[in-house]
Image (cartoon, helix red, strand yellow):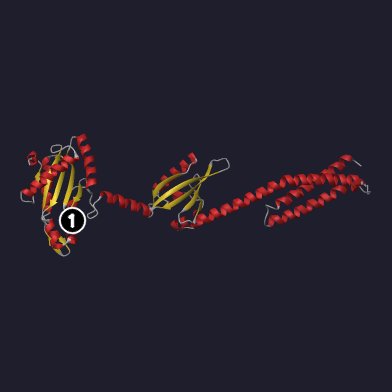
Amino acid sequence: MDVNFVLITIAISILLQFLAAFLALRLILITGRRRAWALIAIALFLMAARRCIPLFRLISGDLSHVPDLTAELIALVTSALMLVGVAWIAPIFLSIKRSEEALREAQEKYRSLVESSEDPVYLVDRDCRYLFLNKKYLSRLSLSMEEVIGRPYGEFQSPEEEKEFTEKIKEVFETGRSLHYEHKSRRDGRYFLRTLSPVKGPDGSPMAVTVISKDITERKRTEQQLAFMATHDPLTGLPNRMLFNDRLTVALAYAQRNRQKLTVMLLDLDSFKQINDTLGHSVGDQLLRAVGDRLKGSLRKTDTVARMGGDEFLLLLPQIARAEDAATVAQHIMKTFQAPFSLEGRELCITASIGIAIYPDDGEDVDTLLRNADKAMYRAKQKGRNNYQRYNPTMDAP
């Protein structure tokens, strides 16, 4: 009998047993129909391994029994190798199994959180093609998953929105870092805080980007309302004293650079207290709003009408070519007051006294111009009301 043939046969038997053991361990990871095929393969490997030992006796015609010592040796070696192999491989498969189960649980938890999120969540690739969208985002698009997956972001958004989004996605892919930015939807005017987070591959480079769009419309509206209230009069909606001063500061800097004039007017309603006391504060408030509207309609879009408080209004007229032009505007304003104001079914007539201060002749800073316009307005009151006066130095006399 050829000794080499015997050794090869024994080696094949041991190898087949190893394969059977390997598949047995793989059963930990295999489920479904593949598990049934794996069981069949294990049975075949074990049957083949069992037949390899007596195979060399059949081929050589030796039907005698293998010496007990040889059989015991083969069994001992095979068992030892099997134990070593199982001890080495089993922990690996168990670790893989635990990792896969943990990953599956994490994926299911992530999908559950994403699907139940009140915020639109979606996944895009480098070309801004949709890879995944949650129900909230699909409802905004009014489309199904099948209609959107694989299609680019730009097909569902305006060119301006597509450009902005593409630039942000490109930045995330280039830097590998998350970023946040505010976005206003052209679809319905709502505001969103977008968080773009890279999904990294095994090499650490971004493979895709997860986008979470949190609706911050109410917060933005609240912020805008607070900002408006800080700079505008709550009754008339006109700029308040603070905003007027800011605009006057900017206008003064521009006028100084370009060697131009500008005009500040202080308008005070005549006998407003009498109307307020006799007809009530509600009518008085309506009258103040109507006066504000009429003043805005009398001036240019570049001019500013502000409510200083009470029944006083401030007017800023930038880029006045001549002092005479300021007088023309004042005359026009007084003419508009000749028409009565219709309030709650009654018509009210009221006049105004106006003080004028011109930059740079009557002052070169905010405080001086306002102070001199106030002096001119009081001079108009002294002259019988219902007129305008421009500031002059004689008004400084006590």
In the picture as drawn, the residue positioned furthest to the bottom comes out as 345
Report x, y in % for residue 386. 8, 51
Q: Is the N terminus in the top left, top right, bottom left or bottom right quadrant? A: top right
Q: Residues within 10 Å of mark 1 (few under 14, many from 20)?
A: many
Quadrant in which the C terminus is drawn: top left
Q: Residue at x 14, y 60 (%)?
A: 277
Q: Is residue 346 left or right of residue 179?
A: left
Residue 194: % across, % down: 43, 48
Image coordinates of residue 227 in percent, x first then y, are 30, 49
Q: Horizontal placement of 237 versus 176: left or right?
A: left
Quadrant housing residue 320: top left
Image quadrant assignment for residue 346? bottom left
In this rendering, the count of numbered labels is: 1
Q: Position of residue 175 (x, y in %)?
A: 48, 39
Residue at the farthest front position: 398
Q: Mark 1 falls on what kind of element?
A: helix
Specify whether residue 262 is in view: no
Query: What residue sits 26% from the left and 48% below the top?
Result: 231
Mark 1: amino acid:
Leu
Relative depth, front residue between 284 and 389 = 284
Q: Residue furthest left?
A: 383
The answer to whether residue 173 of the structure is visible from this angle is yes
Tell which of 35 and 129 is nearer to you.
35
Q: Which of the two residues, 81 or 211, is positioned nearer the viewer here?
A: 81
Q: Residue at x 51, y 56 (%)?
A: 115
Q: Label 1 belongs to which residue?
A: 288
